[in-house]
Image: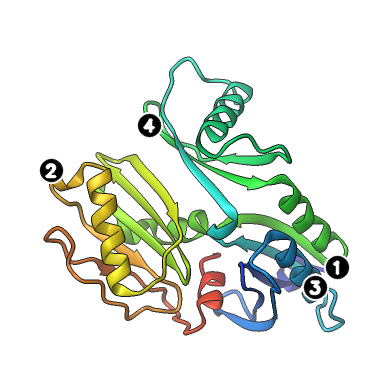
């Protein structure tokens, strides 16, 4: 079958449910195709839900991209070190930093490291190896072909990078029960935090205020603040440190947060 004729799916794997969205055409937004609730907010329950979903007889052949909720991802910023240049050295450096930050993971974690120019910190995402293996196995048991597994922060920011545009900014990605805050100054990453919080305006304002203090922005002056909360394109967050956050939406909005998360995949 021609790749142009293959159906394209996006699965969003979260702590409370797994959603499968189908893209009806190359120029059309994805549509909700099916979903299965998770019995518990755990990786094991999410894998069971994904396997059940992909095993349904109505799921045909095609390509699938998996967007992984930040609930299942750990993040660190890797400070620039000139002596760390080879991929193997960078992987070892990242592994040590993850162990220092989150503790040694006996089950193992797979680390994805972003590319940046010399002198800049890099974003690194850590995903439990058992979870990744389970995601790949669930797809392999279906009639679908896995294209990629993307942490939601990476997928969403890549989609909105041009809209943000500035060299100095705070980007807040607010899932229903999990938020990531990414700060850049001078065109370089400054801080990154992944924390449990709701997408309520007052809680996001408190989170922004706290992160501004921790990053030292309150003393230097606040940069522009951008907020994306999937399914809440009309969200209004109160002013923080004299700056009114700007809510970013997608060209084709969706009221369902998981369908909106699926739309982050180009």
Residue hosting label 4: 120
Tell me the distance, in whole angstroms, between the alpha carbons under discs 4 and 1. 41 Å
Nearer the viewer's eye, disc 1 or disc 2?
2
In the image, residue 87 lies at what x, y percent?
A: 60, 26
Q: Is mark 2 in CB contact (under 8 Å) with mark 3?
A: no
Q: Which residue is mark 2?
A: 219
Residue receiving disc 1: 142
Q: Secondary structure at mark 2?
A: helix
Q: Which residue is mark 3?
A: 54
Quarter of the image for residue 251 reads: bottom left
Task: Tell me how far mark 1 sits from mark 3, CA to CA.
Answer: 6 Å
Mark 4 or 3 closer to N-term? 3
Q: Which residue is at 55% across, 77% downward?
A: 259
Q: What residue is shown at x 13% (from left), y 42% (from top)?
A: 220
For the residues labelled 2 and 3, the Cα–Cα distance comes to: 51 Å
The CA distance from mark 1 to mark 2 is 54 Å
- What percent of the width, then of the height, locates residue 237? 25, 72
Q: Earlier in the sequence, mark 1 or mark 2?
A: 1
Contact between marks 1 and 3 (CB within 8 A): the answer is yes
- Check contact, mark 4 vs mark 3: CB within 8 A: no
Residue 60, labelled with which disc? none
Q: Which numbered disc flags the more N-terminal residue, 2 or 3?
A: 3
Locate residue 239 relative to residue 247 in the image: left or right. left
In the displayed structure, does residue 264 sit left or right of residue 179? right
Viewer-nearest residue: 61 or 223: 223
Q: Determine whether 167 is above or below 148 in the image.
A: above
């Amino acid at each position: 079958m021609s790749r142009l004729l293959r159906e394209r799916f996006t699965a969003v794997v979260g702590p409370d449910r797994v959603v499968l969205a189908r893209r009806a055409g190359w120029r059309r937004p994805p549509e909700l195709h099916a979903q299965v609730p998770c019995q518990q907010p755990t990786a094991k329950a999410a894998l069971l839900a994904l396997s059940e979903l992909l095993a349904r007889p109505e799921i045909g052949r095609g390509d699938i991209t998996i967007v992984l909720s930040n609930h299942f991802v750990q993040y660190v910023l890797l400070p620039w070190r000139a002596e760390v240049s080879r991929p193997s050295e960078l992987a070892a450096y990242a592994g040590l930093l993850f162990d220092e930050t989150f503790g040694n993971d006996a089950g193992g974690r797979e680390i994805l490291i972003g590319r940046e120019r010399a002198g800049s910190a890099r974003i690194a995402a850590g995903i439990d190896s058992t979870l990744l293996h389970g995601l790949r196995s669930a797809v392999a048991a279906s009639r679908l072909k896995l294209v990629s597994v993307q942490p939601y922060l990476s997928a969403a920011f890549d989609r909105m990078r041009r809209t943000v545009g500035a060299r100095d900014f705070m980007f807040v990605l607010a899932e229903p029960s999990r938020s990531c805050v990414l700060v850049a100054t001078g065109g370089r990453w400054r801080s990154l935090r992944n924390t449990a919080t709701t997408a309520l305006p007052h809680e996001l304002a408190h989170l922004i205020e706290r992160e501004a203090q921790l990053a030292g922005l309150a003393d230097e002056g606040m940069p522009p603040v951008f907020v994306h909360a999937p399914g809440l394109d009309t969200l209004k967050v109160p002013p923080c440190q004299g700056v009114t956050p700007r809510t970013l939406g997608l060209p084709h909005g969706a009221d369902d947060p998981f369908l909106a998360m699926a739309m982050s995949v180009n």
